[in-house]
Amino acid sequence: MNPVELIRKKRDGKSLTDDEIKFLVSNYTKRKIPDYQFSAFLMAGFLNGLNKQETAALTRSMLYSGKVIDLSSIPGVKVDKHSTGGVGDKTSLILAPIVAAAGVKVPMISGRALGHTGGTLDKLEAIPGYRTDLSLIEYKSVLQKCGAVLIGQTKEIAPADKMIYALRDVTATVESIPLITASIMSKKLAEGINGLVLDVKTGSGAFMRKQKDARALADSLINTAKSFNKKVIGFITDMNQPLGNYIGNWLEVYESIKVLQGEKVDDLLEVTLNLSSAMIYLGGKAKSIKEGIKISQEMIDNGKAFEKFKEFVELQGGDISLIKNPDKYPKSEFHNKVLAEKNGYVESIDVYEIGMASIELGGGRLKKDDVIDPKAGIIFYPKIGSRLKKGDLIAEIFTDRKNKVEEVRKKLLDAIKISNHKVNKVKLIKQILK
Amino acid sequence: MNPVELIRKKRDGKSLTDDEIKFLVSNYTKRKIPDYQFSAFLMAGFLNGLNKQETAALTRSMLYSGKVIDLSSIPGVKVDKHSTGGVGDKTSLILAPIVAAAGVKVPMISGRALGHTGGTLDKLEAIPGYRTDLSLIEYKSVLQKCGAVLIGQTKEIAPADKMIYALRDVTATVESIPLITASIMSKKLAEGINGLVLDVKTGSGAFMRKQKDARALADSLINTAKSFNKKVIGFITDMNQPLGNYIGNWLEVYESIKVLQGEKVDDLLEVTLNLSSAMIYLGGKAKSIKEGIKISQEMIDNGKAFEKFKEFVELQGGDISLIKNPDKYPKSEFHNKVLAEKNGYVESIDVYEIGMASIELGGGRLKKDDVIDPKAGIIFYPKIGSRLKKGDLIAEIFTDRKNKVEEVRKKLLDAIKISNHKVNKVKLIKQILK
C-alpha cells in the first residue's frame, strides 16, 4: 500500500477499505506517514466524506492505537455518557453519582474545555485536591469501590486521536462529522463500557448550531457505537440557553451540589434526569426511560446520589469539606450584578457569547496554556420566554479581572434579544434516538 | 493573517484574495508555514478549485518567489512555446531555430521527462557536451548572440514552484488545472518573454486524455498569460499517435536534425510549423499564422534554421560534429525490428504504453535518480489510418537491455488496435485559441 494512492482514492470520492484506513492511521501513529500526507488525507476526507464503514474503521484504528481498558473483572454493566458540549452543561457531575447510586457502573473519561464550552475535567479540578490523572489501576479501583470514576484521557488511551486532533486543529479539518465521530468514539470505546448515552446539543451555544447537523452527528455516533456492539441511546437537546444558571468551573460544581441536595433547577434537572435514566435503562436497572427518571429522582431525594458524589470525590483526592460547605470556597475579587435595561420577553440568547464572556472573566482558556481561574464565571438567570422588567437581576459576574467587568456586562445584555410579545419556552429534549 | 483561517476559507469554497494567496505562498517558501498546512490548502484547492483571479495570484506569488529575468537589454520580441508533453514531441528542438532564424528571440527554459513523456532537457543532454545549466548571464549572452537559448530551470527561478511541486507529488494534488497552470506559468513568466505559444495535447499519450480537459487547461493558461499582459496563442493538438516516428532522447535529436535538413515528416512538420508560425506572428515577423507557416518553411528550405540549430548547440557546449554527422552517434547494443502480425488498418494507438516502452528500454526514468540511456528508444512507423500487412516493419527497438526486447516488442504490438475497415487519419490541430 502507498499513502499517495490512498489519498488519491479518497480525493476522487472513492471509499477506502478497513485495511487501507488501518494502514494510514497506524503508519501515521508510528510517524512513518508524515504530517503533510495525513493532512492531505484529512482534507480529502473532510470534503468528500467518509461513509459508515470508513468511520467505523477509522474509529477502530484510532481505538487500537492504544490500550482498551478491560473492566470485565468488575461486576455489573458499565455505561458512560458523552455530551458534545455546551454552556453551563454540568450534567456529568450530577448524573454520574445518580447512576452509580442506582447500581450501574459509570467509568467516565472526560475532556477539557473546548472553544466557548466548558469541560468536565476543568470543573472537577476546581475542587482542591481532586486528581483527574489517575493511573488505569487507580481508575479501576475507584470504579470498583464506589461505582463511578471521572478522570481525564491518559497517554495510554487512543494516542492516535491526540496526534490526529492536534493536526486537525491546525489544518482546518475539525468540523467534520466522521472525524468528530472517530475522535469521540475511539476514546469512549477505550473506557471498557457496555453502553453509551449521547447528548448531542444544538443551538446558539452548541458546535452544531443547526438541528439537522446535530442529528447527522448523532446518527454517525450511534452507527459507530452499534458497529462495536455497544448499547446506545442518543439525545438531541437544546443549547439555545445555558443549561441551569451557573457558568464557570467552581460555580458549576456548586450548582451540581445544590441539585444533588434537592434544589429544583428545572431545565438542568430535565436534561440530566433524561440522560441518567437512559443510562440506568441501558444498565438494566430500569425497564424504561420513564422508570429510570423515577429512580433518578429517588436517588436525589433519598440522598444516595449526593453521598456517591462525595464518595468518588474523596476517593479521587478532592477536599470533601468544600463539598459539604460549598459557601466556604474562595471568592472572586469582584462580584457585580447585571440588571435588565428594558421590559419585555426573552426571545433568544446568544449562548456562544455567554460562553466567551465566562472565558474573558478567567473561567476558560483563550490559548492552550492559559491558566483557568476556577472561581470566575457567571450566574445567568433568564431563559427563553422569561419576562423581564427594567432593573431585574439578570446576571452576576465573578472575576478577579476588574477591567473585564463592564465589557462582560455589556456582552451579556447584548446576548439577550428582547421582544414585546410573549415568547414560548423551548423544548429541551428535541429527539431521542436508539 | 492566519494560515488555518485561509485553509478554512478555501475548504468552505470561498475565494482567497491576492494578499491571502501571497501570504500562504511566501510564508511557505520561507518555511514559516509548515508542509502539513500547505498540503491541506493544496487539497482544498484541488477539490474546491481556484478561480481565474486566484490562479493568477498563485502564479504571481510563485513567480516572485524567485528572479524574473530582465531581457530588455536584448533587442526584439521574445517568444517561447510550452507543451504539456507527449510522446515523440520534439517540436521545441525544431521550432526554436526556425523562429530565431525568422528574427524572433526564443528564450526557452525547459523541463525534464515527466511520467511517460519525454523532456526537452533530457533530449538536449543526449548531445555530448551540451550544457543545460547555464548561468543567467550565459543564458542572456547565448540569446543575444544567436537568438535562441534552451536551458533548464535554475535555482533562482520560481523556487516556490519546486517546493510546491515536490509537495503535490507526494500528496496526490498534481492533476489540478489551477495548480498545473501556476506551476507552468510561474516558470515561463520568469523567462522574460513578451509572448507565449501553448501546445496543450490531448489523447492517449497526453496528460489530458479528454479534449474537454485539455481545453480547460488551455483556457486557464491563456487567461493567466493575459492577466500578465503577455501575448498568447493556444493550440489543442492531437496526441493519439506519437509525433513523428522517433521516440527516445538521441533518436528525437536525430529526427529533428533530419527535419531541419528538409526531410518531410508530415505530422511532426504540421504541428511544429503551426507552433513556430504562431511564435513568428506573436513576434511581429508575420502578419498571420498562415504567413508564419510560409516563413517557417522557408527557414528550413534555405538552411537558416539548421544553421541556427548548430549555432546554439555550439554556444551551449554541444559537440557539433555529431550534429553534422548524426550517424556517427554511438549505437545501442541491440537493434531489433518489430513486424506486423496481421493485416488491417490502424484504428487506435495506446501512446501511453509506447512512452512507457521507451522508458523500459532505458530512454527514461522510472525513479527520480535513474540514469537515462540517450541511445535507447523506438522508431515507430504506423499512424492512425495506416494500412498494415502481416510482415510489415512497424517499429525498431534500440536498447542495451537485452531482457527488455521481447517484452517491448509485445507491448508495441498490443498498443496497436487493428480494424478490418478503413480508418480516417486524425486531425492534428484540433483548436487554435487566442
Image: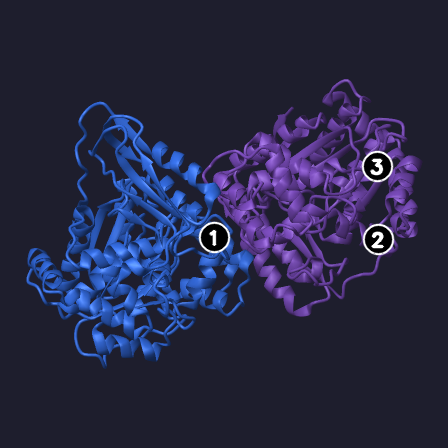
Chain colours: A blue, B purple
Of the residues shown, which amino acid type is indicated by label 1? Asp
Q: Chain of mark 2?
A: B
Work out whether residue B383 or residue A26 is closer to the camera in this orientation and state it: A26
In this figure, which residue is indicated by the disc labeled 3? Answer: B97
On the image, the x and y values in percent for residue A337 come to 33, 40
At 23% across and 38% down in the image, what residue appears? A383
Residue A308 coordinates in the image, percent (x, y): 20, 69
Q: Is residue B273 above or below residue B251?
A: above
* Residue B268 visible (yes or no): no
Between A374 and B281, the one nearer to me in the picture: A374
What secondary structure is marked by label 3?
A: helix
Q: Residue furthest bottom?
A: A73
Q: Is residue B57 left or right of residue A158?
A: right
Kindly state the secondary structure of the residue where label 2 is placed.
loop
Tell me the kind of residue under disc 3. Pro
x and y, in percent, of residue B144 in the image: 91, 35
The label shown at residue A169 is 1
- Please tell me which of labels 3 and 2 falls first in the chain: 3
Residue at 63% x, 26% y is: B432
Comparing labels 1 and 2, the label whose residue is closer to the camera: 1
> Residue B127 — which label?
2
Q: Who's the residue at 58% across and 45% down the image?
A: B207
Say which residue appears at 84% left-offset and 32% top-offset.
B105
